[in-house]
Image: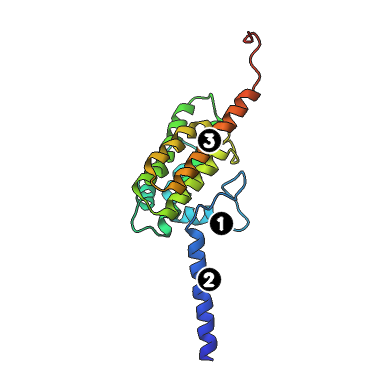
Amino acid sequence: MKLWLASIALVLCLACQQTEIVRERYRLADSGDSWTRSTYDPVLRDLQARYPEFFDAIYSTGAVEPDLRPLRDDLEQKPVNAKNFDALNAVAVGYFELNARAETHRGETGYLQSSFRVAKVLAVPWRAYGEIDEPRLRDAILDFFEDASSGKKSHSSRTAPRLLEVIESLGKKESSPERSARIQTLRDDLATRLARETRAVPAPVGDAP
């Protein structure tokens, strides 16, 4: 009986450890074009419970400035643990949500202010990359920038060009040859895609030589 109970306890302990390991990653890469639903990872539910005030501001119908300090502090804390990754994923959700909302109202009053708000959110993981040199966290931050620049998330394809210089600047913060190569690949892939899309856009009538 004691052996059986010990076995159950061990299984439960391993399950808890696996759940913790799952949290310590960028969790939105496989969520398709959305960041609000997932059949296997309730990321938004988890993060709303951890950062309620941040998400209240993100989902507010008014022009509310989210307080980024709690997320910045968690993302840059040492030693790195699950809290860093929770902050990264919360920032990612905030970025995609605000970016989609801004693009939906492109050209309308308040669009420029909304774009500035998106840029402030994006600056949080950009800064953390230079502050924290823990490999797993840097890899997760690169996963976010790869997702954001891929154009797969709703309304993100039009804003991907803005990320070109941001991604390139990460290389100046990196000493690892492997991650430096990954950053360069991300930058080159994005630049190639943007060049291809630019060539595909027909020139306005009258602009041809």
Q: CA distance from mark 3 to mark 1?
A: 33 Å
Question: What's under tag 3, amino acid-wise?
Answer: Asp
Query: Which image quarter: residue 203?
Result: top right
Q: Residue at x 46, y 31 (%)?
A: 115
Q: Nearer the viewer, mark 3 or mark 2?
A: 3
Quadrant location of the N terminus? bottom right
Whether residues under marks 3 and 2 lie with C-beta atoms below 8 angstroms apart, the answer is: no
Secondary element at tag 3: helix
Q: CA distance from mark 3 to mark 2?
A: 40 Å
Report the label total. 3
Residue 169 position, x and y percent, is 41, 36
Residue 42: numbered disc: 1
Residue at the spot of label 2: 15
Q: Is residue 178 left or right of residue 78?
A: right
Q: Is residue 110 left or right of residue 41?
A: left
Q: Is residue 135 left or right of residue 194?
A: left
Task: Specify which label sits upstream in the sequence, 3 or 1.
Answer: 1
Q: Between residues 171 and 103, which one lies in front from this camera angle?
A: 171
Secondary element at tag 2: helix
Residue 60 position, x and y percent, is 48, 41
Say few, some or many: other residues with alpha carbon within 10 Å of mark 1 (under 14 / 14 to 19 / 20 or more): few
Residue 188: numbered disc: 3
Residue 3 higher or lower than 163, as above or below: below
Task: Specify which label sits upstream in the sequence, 3 or 2.
Answer: 2
Residue 67 shows in the view: no
Q: Residue furthest bottom?
A: 1
